[in-house]
Image (cartoon, grey):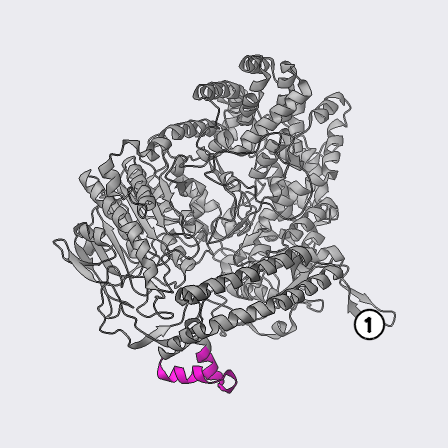
Amino acid sequence: MSPDSLTRVPHDASALDRRRFLFRAGGGFLGVALGGLWAEAGEIPNAIVGPHLRPKARSVIFLFMAGGVSHIDTFDPKGNAHAGQLMDAVGFGDNLAAMKRPVIPCHRTFTRHGKSGTPVSDWFPHIGGVIDEIAVVRSMWCHEGNHFPAVIETCTGHRGRQFDHPSFGAWVSYALGSANRNLPTFVNIGRPSSPVQLTGGYLGAGVSATPFQAGPTPVPHLHPPEGLSARERDRQMELLESMNGEFRARHALQSAIQARTRAYELAARMQLSAPEAVDFASEPAHIRSMYGLDDRHTEEFGKQLLLARRLSERGVRFIQVCHAGGGNGGWDSHGDMKTHEPLCRATDRPIAGLIRDLKQRGMLDDTLVVWTSEFGRTPWSQNTTGRDHNPKGYTSWLAGGGVQGGLVHGATDDVGYRAVENPHYYSDLNATILHLLGLDHTRMELPALGPVSRLVERGGPIHEILA
Amino acid sequence: MNTGRAAEKLPAKDLSWWSLQPVQRPAVPGGDLGNDNPIDRFLSVSRGVQPKPPAERLTLLRRVHLDLTGLSPTPAEQDAFLADTSPEAYRKVVDRLLADEQHAVRYARHWLDVLRYADADERMTAAPGIHLWRDWVIQALHEDLPYDQFVQVQLTGRRSTERTQMSATGHRSQREPRPGDLFALGFLARGAGSDPQELAMNAVDTISSTFLGMTVACAKCHDHMFDPVSQADYYSMKALFDPLVLRKVTLASAGDLVAAGKAQAELERQRAPLERERDALLEPVRRKLYDDRVAMLPPDVQVVIRKPERTRSVEEQKIADDYFPILRIDGDKIDEVLTEDLRKKDRELRRRIDDLTQAIRRTNSPVIPVFHTVEADPDRAREQRYVLTSADPSRSETNRPVKPGWPFVRGPIDFREGRVEAFADWLTAPENPLFARVAVNRLWQWHFGEGLHRQPSDFGHQTGKPTQPELLDWLASELVRSGFSLRHIHRLIVTSATYQRASESEGALKPGSAEAAHHERDPDNRQLWRHPVRRLEAEAIWDSLHGAAGLLDLQVGGPSFEPGERSGTGKSTQTAATATKRRRGMYITRGFSTSREATPDFLRTFDAEDGRDPCPMRTRTVTAPQALFLMNSPEVGRAADALAARLRSEAGTDLPRAVDLAYRLVLSRPPEAKERERSLAYLENDPQRLSRFTWLLFNLDEFIHVP
């Protein structure tokens, strides 16, 4: 197929625009598609858009730090020249009143790491050790200054939930489908801030995230009830097939009934492949140690990242790992910046371990690792020693998958409040990820009743950080 | 491809569009009806294919039961229907089902999809008690409240003939609404959000798509691109509802309210000394933290903060309020800086206060149920309303004033009985070309899976024309003629020969067969030459599962419940013996929240909507998670065990009888010879294997499909 024919959204999308776009005025449609979520590459044409460009990344591991990491205390050092000075600030949360607040000091020490000499704070020594793989973008911004609105804005590319916009991973699922017929395309690990981070939106439940957890039951209802032998279940499945025979023959025209056979087959294959994907028995001690599985502080997140690598290895396209989700998010350090410390410790070694592990396996070339929050934190404090929400300037970083490592791009102002040099709206990050996956954001559009829907409405890839 | 482009060629904003023309009652084709149902006459005219023969009797019985009540026929009902050889047998079943309260439960669920019912929504102030609106809808359908009044009461709280009364001396006054009808206003209250104008916008969006079949909401941001609805029309319609505000109603008895008041006073009295002690303990610490924070403020702000509140000017008070979040001292902040000794004392005091609070709440304080209704606020009614080009109620605009009104009507409107009342009268009038058409089309869709007009909430230019326009108009006129009796239309549809046809289509795959030719000519079955097979909705799967197991509780109404099944917990500790009954799937809680999943896994897996927006037609997916639920979930395991126990208790060790009963309970028919044979072979003469066998039945395609 020529790239052009791929950009045109085929029949499924016309069903989609009949669907529930614009207040769901339209009718339903028969999503016979095991497509997307449980797609079977080659069997079902679920790759709806298809790659436009030559993809650099095959898979994305998206690390989401819920609550807002302070860029000032991690990747964007500002020194303390302005500490104590009053600056123009805005109130907290919904209170957008203009006020004066003092810049609070940063108590971190920064070390220049690697050949690139990129400074990283003493909270992330291990990440410092792999900094030459990482492109740090210090000039991100978004609109929303509160957690849920910002999470929605960043993960769907749209503000508010007036329309049922899909999450980023759902778009990728929809566009590319699965590379593994036994596993879902879009997986979420860890507790998200909001269910919107998992939603398929108007692209349908078929492309929403499948929550996976490290441990014996990665997916709900994966295992047959206890006390049922595998032999017995096989016998049941065989009998089921023959007992369904007459009914299926009588209703041969009903695609939904025919699709049910495949759904059961896939469920059965998942029962075999998903436990294998989450079983770390074959991982040697030195690999477990890289991810910090031998330390109680890093064990939980380490397991999640090791699972992420295993899923990426098995062809899952988009693996979203949420750290410290739930409520406003664990990184929401209003009271005291010290509360960042245990979170940094819990994630530092696992993240560095993931990058090293991907590298030694040769996977880093086509696996994109992205690290971000919904926003950053302010130079001033709400009161005393914590920092407030800051959507006007913050840091995200990328590694592998066609990204040039050892790079710092963009800058905030002297105190770390506003992105001033090469500012990038959050959509630029999304467009960059799409670009590396071989997708042109301008051609990923859905015809709907009236407006055309896109993930990225403005901006484009951050070309300066591409390898 | 761009569907918009093709549509632009149509004469936009065309008032001559078919759906805006008055409903003319068409003559039934073929003259004298005899025993024919008019529906069959309309469909036979346009049919170029040979329709299927009538469905088998038990197939039909299961179909009409699941369709009208969402519940399968019991073995006794199956026997009775087979035994009744009179020509009236089917009609008697239909009458029985339509009179059953469970029919109202089933169809209330359909209506609530388009009325965007939700139990929870973080912006939804009216969440507590909202189920009382849902229960009102059930009751209204059960009474066959005429459809025009069904809508009137939800918009105005009153039936249109019961708004005002005259005194003997000629004074007109508002009549008291019927007591239970208060709960109908949950429909409007449900849309209230953080901004007061959200209620009105939500009302316009829902009413226009649900009752009018027009996507008026498109005109929120711009004039409608295809239909004769301008942006000013949208905001005129919004102005109808702008005066409405929420009002919280407590539903407790006078005795309970008095008791609750006493309990609170008692609590405060007993807590006071402890609170004083705690304040004395913490005040110095709090003071110090506060002074430190004030010292960090700009000097001019410090001056303002140090002033006593009464002596601050309005501007100064604004400054003080702005800085409040900075000076607010949270409990954990104090806890952080306390000495070990003080912290211990503080914890002990806190524990005593908590214990006391709980003790008093437990013993003396009755639960005070509440409900939110709406009422017109006279001050808001006087305010001028404007077009909001941003569609954002929080951004005030005053450029383009609008008057209350609505599209498709010009000239002065009589608002003497109230704005919403005037609109409701126009909306529900027999002459409104859209009102009855949209309603009968929905009923048709709920019976056949698809409407005569395929876009049930959009009768505008974008969506084309219905397949059988005469039938749609005849049904619409029949709804009006019957005094808006929904039950009358239900009865007409399900007693038609069209509805009773077989659905099997095996032969359509054989090239050259007559059926293949029909399929060729009408692959989408637009002419209903065979009955469409449908998958059960989430709620009906839930009911069928628990119904067959004998675990279904048919109690009507009441607060919604969480099914209590959490993802990831593989094992259930409940056994069949201890299994408790479950209420119908209709009452499973649903809703939308950005901070937590408010619609349970089960409902989402089987495509139920979260109630955020009106849902005219549910998505239908076929996915592996659905298969995993039916294969491995504790719910299905429990139901399989309970059904097996039921079979053992009713059939003892007589396994052929157990197999027969199982088929009749799960699939509403006895097994065929081959099926009986296979089942018995699988059971290996062992009654203990029955729960494995019942699992099989729940996993059959036939279990979740209705042929």
Image quadrant in which the N terminus of chain A is located: top left
The chain holding disc 1 is: B
Q: Quadrant of residue B568?
A: top left
- Does B232 appear above or below B620? below
Question: Going by the image, does A102 lie left or right of B287?
Answer: left
Asked whether residue A220 appears in the rendered view, the answer is yes
* Residue at x 24%, y 34% (from the top left corner): A284
Q: Main secondary structure of the magenta part?
A: helix
- Does B670 appear above or below B613? above
Q: Quadrant of residue B110?
A: top right
Question: Going by the image, does A18 lie left or right of B137?
Answer: left
Question: Going by the image, does B382 lie left or right of B682?
Answer: right
- Does A238 appear above or below B436? above
Q: Farthest residue in the front direction? A: B341
Q: Farthest residue in the left direction? A: A115
What range of the chain is rendered magenta? B297-320
Camera-side residue of A187 and B349? B349
Residue on which disc 1 sits: B171
